Image (cartoon, rainbow, N blue to C red):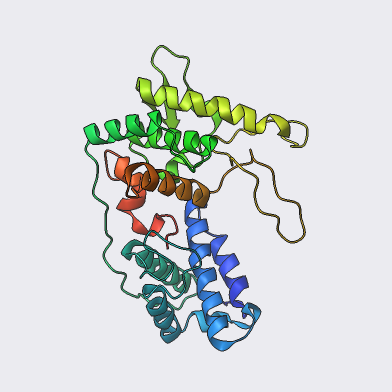
């Protein structure tokens, strides 16, 4: 297969061949980081980084080494802006460059580090922690953001699914008025306990209030995505700040979850720690979400 000469174009073509949105998002995040890192090292624009540059093993190894030391980090992680990258994010970076190179007929076959899994809460601990978080709105956090984060945790506890499966959920995936309330995740229905049902009902009411003003401006009518923003975004490129109530990105949900658990519990917990069984993302670290 003939590779395009421009590296960023090659990344877009490669990403377009991937099946799932989660994988596309992850591969694009890390390969864009690779392009930006090479451009920074050479003090040139990203448009001058070629596909050949990306397929060079020494370049790839140097990028991975820099990422491992935390030198490519664009935002603070759990342990600060200069902390070394987590093993799982390094595995995802390595997998990204390996699959990219295979796609263009120049397989690098770099060895990823073994994945690391966070300690699980027991089912009793998960339910008790959910009850604690659902009953106490922590100071310094928007009430609407707290409600959304608690609803997300409730689904993780009841379904055992992580953010990749929970993020695409839509309003019809909740059936809270049934005698046995339930939620649909990744095509399957799961029963909800009383605490989880109440948390989701509270969030659904808030969701309705946040999105009510978009009925006239959105061509598709109401916002059907279950997870929406709870505050206006930042103005970018001279455009006005987007209002609250628009579909929320994975990173937005993860940042709010980290803040809630760190504030309320004194230590940040990953959403996966509330899941009763190993999530699909963990079973295949290459399909995990981007990390620091």
Camera-nearest residue between 71 and 135? 135
Quadrant in the picture for residue 234: bottom right
Residue 284 is situated, as x and y percent measured from the top left of the image, at: 33, 55
Place of residue 222 in the rendered image (x, y in percent of width and height, measured from the top left):
68, 31
The residue at the point 44 percent across, 27 percent down is 199
Quarter of image, res 128 = top left
Q: Is residue 196 above or below residue 262?
A: above
Q: Is residue 127 left or right of residue 29?
A: left
| Residue at figure coordinates x 37%, y 40% from the top left | 161
Q: Nearer the viewer, residue 9 or 172?
A: 172
In percent of width and height, residue 191 lies at 36, 23
Report whether residue 1 is seen: no
Judge left or right: residue 121 versus residue 290.
Answer: left
**Residue 224 image offset from top left, x and y in percent:** 61, 33
Decide if residue 31 is in sight here.
Answer: yes
- The residue nearer to you, when weighing 65 against 150, is 150
**Above/below status of 39 relative to 266:** below
Residue name at image x 42 percent, y 43 percent: 260
Q: Quadrant of residue 231?
A: top right
Along the viewing direction, whichever of 76 and 69 lies nearer the viewer: 76
Which quarter of the figure is the C terminus placed in? bottom left
Q: Is residue 184 left or right of residue 205?
A: left
Total marks in image: 0
Q: Quadrant of the N terminus?
A: bottom right
Say if 25 sits above or below 9 in the image.
Answer: above
């Amino acid at each position: 297969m003939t590779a395009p000469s421009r590296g960023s174009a090659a990344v877009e073509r490669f990403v377009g061949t991937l099946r799932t949105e989660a994988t596309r998002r992850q591969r694009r995040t890390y390969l864009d980081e690779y392009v930006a890192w090479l451009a920074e090292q050479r003090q040139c624009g990203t448009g001058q980084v070629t596909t050949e540059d990306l397929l060079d093993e020494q370049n790839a190894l140097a990028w991975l080494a820099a990422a491992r030391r935390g030198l490519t980090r664009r935002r603070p992680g759990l342990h600060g802006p200069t902390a070394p990258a987590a093993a799982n994010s390094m595995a995802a970076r390595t997998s990204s460059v390996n699959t990219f190179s295979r796609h263009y007929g120049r397989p690098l076959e770099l060895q990823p580090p073994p994945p690391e899994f966070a300690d699980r809460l027991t089912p009793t601990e998960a339910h008790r922690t959910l009850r604690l978080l659902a009953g106490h709105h922590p100071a310094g956090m928007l009430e609407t953001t707290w409600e959304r984060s608690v609803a997300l945790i409730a689904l993780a506890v009841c379904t055992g699914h992580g953010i990749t499966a929970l993020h695409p959920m839509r309003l019809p995936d909740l059936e809270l008025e049934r005698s046995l309330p339930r939620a649909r995740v990744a095509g399957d229905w799961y029963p909800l306990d009383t605490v989880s049902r109440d948390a989701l009902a509270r969030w659904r009411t808030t969701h309705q209030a946040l999105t009510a003003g978009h009925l006239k401006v959105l061509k598709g009518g109401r916002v059907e995505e279950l997870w929406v923003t709870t505050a206006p975004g930042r103005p970018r490129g001279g455009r006005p700040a987007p209002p609250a109530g628009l579909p929320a990105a994975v990173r937005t949900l993860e940042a709010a979850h980290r803040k809630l658990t760190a504030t309320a519990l004194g230590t940040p917990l990953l959403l996966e720690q509330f899941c009763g069984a190993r999530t699909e993302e963990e079973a295949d670290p290459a399909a995990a979400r981007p990390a620091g």
